[in-house]
Image (cartoon, helix red, strand yellow):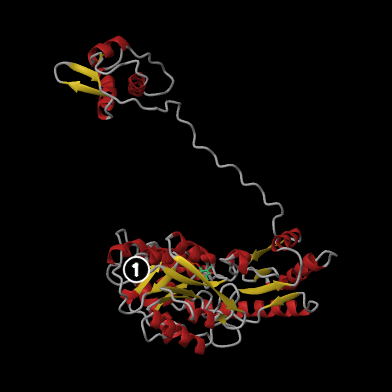
Amino acid sequence: MIPAINDTGKLLYEQIYEFYRDAIIRQKLKFNERLPSHRTLAKELGIGNNTVIRAYEQLIHEGYIKNESRKGLFVAKLDAHDWQLQPVKKPPVSPAKRPAATKPDFKLFDHLVDEKNFPLKHWRKCTNWALDHMSFQYEEHAGKDPLKEQLQQYLFYSRGVSATVDRLIIGSGTTALLFWLAFVLRKTHKEIVFEEPCYHRPRHLFSEFGYRITPVRVNDEDGIDLQKLLKRRADLLYLTPSHQYPMGSAVPVGNRIQILNWAKKNKAFIIEDDFDCEFRYKTRLMPSLQGLDKYNRVIYVGSFSSSLMPSLRVAYLVLPEDFPIDFKDSIHLTNTVPYITRRTLAYFMERGYWERHLKKMRKIYQEKYNVSIAALKKLPENCIHFNNAPSGLNIFLRINSRLSEQELIRRALDRGVSITPVSGFYHNRSNLPRQPELLFEFGNLPLSEIGNVVEKLYDAWFQSSDH
Ligand SMILES: Cc1ncc(COP(=O)(O)O)c(C=O)c1O
């Protein structure tokens, strides 16, 4: 078989290669059939020998033909296969996203942080500095890690957390680190207690790993229901003791001590998620549970997601002393934060920009919190109950309405406000409250719009006859 060549723009050797490859795949040329010698073919086609040699070499290299010395070139043996010989298509273009029914003007969801007040100038400076100190090598847990050193100090002075560099692990987000932890503990730990309601992502991932999940209810006032917890046996407890997510309550010190004793008695580990701990508006920061722990039972997790920005993807985990599980072989899995980000952040902290930013944001968020509460208090009584926990970036709302959570969300969206539902944070549907609950996330709301947004919500939910 002699290929027909033409000047379609494709290289000659490619045309010859494709002709024989397709003929072999389609079995027009059968096993052990002989191909013309390169000289014969070149002569036949009126082209240079080298062009044919190049095409034949490619066919040999990919295994379509074999060169039997002194005998010639023969079709190789190929098993039957469903070859896809259609011309190569362009990759499919993902369908354009359907526009949301109504595009919200105000977003009270997704843990949005205040974007306007991010210190971009300082961040840029630190990024440039980090670029000047780039590494092109694997930097896996080798030698000194400046970010760990900065974090160690910050955690000690600000959260009372004692962390040595070898017990401090940095990864790209709380859930990524918890994923690793669930993996490391999976053979020795089987049952985990979660707050009900709680941040759903850790619960989902532990469930995916096959852990048995036990939900224990949270009170508005003091976090997880202590009496219910004390009656439970479990290997692990996931807790947000300083700022319960989503309800906002904090576990008082007396309860903390009992929870630590419970962990000691059960030989359980407590995963303390200290998310949003940086922001308390009326009192000093609540010290961490880890700082109180004398039994090495607390695994501490923190994140830069609300204190800097979620898109940074940096979080940290502190293992207790004498952690009994050997994790040497899997520690490389946590190496998920790019070196350039670690250096930038370390320098940002070292230069004091981090402290300064936190101080500034505490004031800004405090003001937003106060204005939100003032606007909620102005509403007619008994319509919207809100928790009185001056901390974090959200306010937990309980709506005194017969409308469903979905309907409330839809009506709010009609007024241009998207708001976070709480039902997804419950493990057991039977624990869902009678009155719908929502999260008013004020982090990225402009201060001047908060009153307006609260009024919009009230109008959406109560200014019609069927609420
Ligand atoms: C309780 C809790 N912990 C941690 C996080 C942050 O997770 P990450 O560090 O993956 O951004 C969130 C974010 O919503 C949260 O609600």
Nearer to me, 301 or 146: 301
Instruction: Look at the image and tell me whether residue 130 can be seen.
Output: no
Among the 4 quarters of the image, the one containing residue 447: bottom right
Residue under circle 1?
A: 188
Q: Identify the residue shown where x is 48% and y is 66%.
A: 124
Residue lying farthest left? Answer: 70
Where 339 sits versus 39, above or below?
below
Q: Residues within 10 Å of mark 1 (few under 14, many from 20)?
A: few
Where 392 sits versus 8, above or below?
below
Q: In this view, does 34 lie to the left or right of 280?
A: left
Among the 4 quarters of the image, the one containing residue 338: bottom left
Q: Which quadrant of the figure contains the N terminus?
A: top left
Q: Position of residue 116 (x, y in %)?
A: 60, 68
Instruction: Look at the image and tell me whether residue 424 can be seen.
Output: yes
Q: Position of residue 183 (x, y in %)?
A: 37, 63
Q: Where is residue 394 in the image (x, y as percent from the top left)?
A: 62, 73
Secondary structure category for the residue under label 1: loop
Q: In this view, does 348 lie to the left or right of 404?
A: left
Nearer to me, 63 or 405: 405
Among the 4 quarters of the image, the one containing residue 52: top left
Residue lying farthest top? Answer: 44
Q: What residue type is labelled 1?
A: Thr
Q: Where is residue 89 in the image (x, y as percent from the top left)?
A: 48, 31
Residue lying farthest bottom? Answer: 254
Q: How many labels does the image show?
A: 1
